[in-house]
Image (cartoon, rainbow, N blue to C red):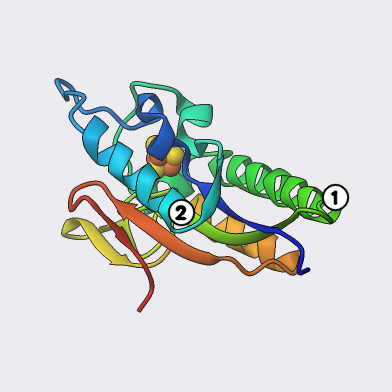
Amino acid sequence: MPPVVFKLALVSHCILNQAVRYWPPGARLERPVFLLEIVSKLYRMGFSLLQLPCPEFLFKGNPRPSYTRTEYEMIDGFQDHCRKLASELASSIEHVIDLSTEPRIELTAVVGVERSPSCAVFKVPVSSRDGRIYVDGRGIFMDMLEQELRARGLYPRFISVDFKANIILEAP
Ligand code: SF4
């Protein structure tokens, strides 16, 4: 009999806990149904979910300004903070995988959040002469998490939740 395998997905913190998100003044809690759909879809995709830490909340709390990736890169200590979180997380996942013989755990996916300066997977906000623009690329934390996982021989696919379009994005 082949061993039972659990497909683990690391999920950006705010997909499961909206309380840490950047919160514009006067914003309302408007997405509970969508979040339920997202989580249901991830379970239907066969994933076991593990919640990632929120790098921005753990660094600046709430309320916090709406920064671009460029602005976060210039904040003293933020990149070191993200690197530490990513490194500790990757080591912890490596340990979990090493310990899981039966049933086995395989790191299959990382689920980020589109347009987040920290957790974007496909489109990230950066500063330009014309103000904020969106370019192809990862957020700071996702970038570092991918590097730390790869350094340990782990190559999950990166997918992403788009809160505005209410969809899960996957690479073509
Ligand atoms: S996208 Fe990332 S940094 Fe932004 S609130 Fe969610 S978990 Fe935190």
Name the residue type under label 1. Leu
Q: Quick one: SS at disc 1?
A: helix
Q: Which mark is residue 172?
A: none
Name the residue type under label 2. Val
As drawn, 130 above or below 58: below
- Picture quarter with the C terminus: bottom left
Q: Nearer the viewer, residue 154 or 84?
A: 154
Q: Quick one: SS at disc 2?
A: strand
**Neighbourhood count class around disc 1 (C-alpha, 10 Å): few under 14, some 14–19, many 20 upward:** few
Q: Which mark is residue 99?
A: 1
Q: Nearer the viewer, residue 1 or 26?
A: 1
Q: Position of residue 123 (x, y in %)?
A: 32, 62
Q: Is residue 119 visible?
A: no
**Neighbourhood count class around disc 2 (C-alpha, 10 Å): few under 14, some 14–19, many 20 upward:** many
Looking at the image, tell me whether mark 1 or mark 2 is earlier in sequence order: 1
Would residue 64 appear left or right of 3 to someone viewing this image?
left
Q: Which residue is mark 2?
A: 111
Residue plotted at (19% across, 48% down): 164
As drawn, 158 above or below 23: below
Q: Position of residue 30 (x, y in %)?
A: 18, 29
As drawn, 4 above or below 51: below
Residue plotted at (57% across, 47% down): 79
Q: Is mark 1 within 8 Å of ligand 1?
A: no
Residue plotted at (44% across, 23% down): 61
| Residue that extends furthest to the front in the rendered view of this protein | 1
Where ligand 1 lies, by quadrant?
top left
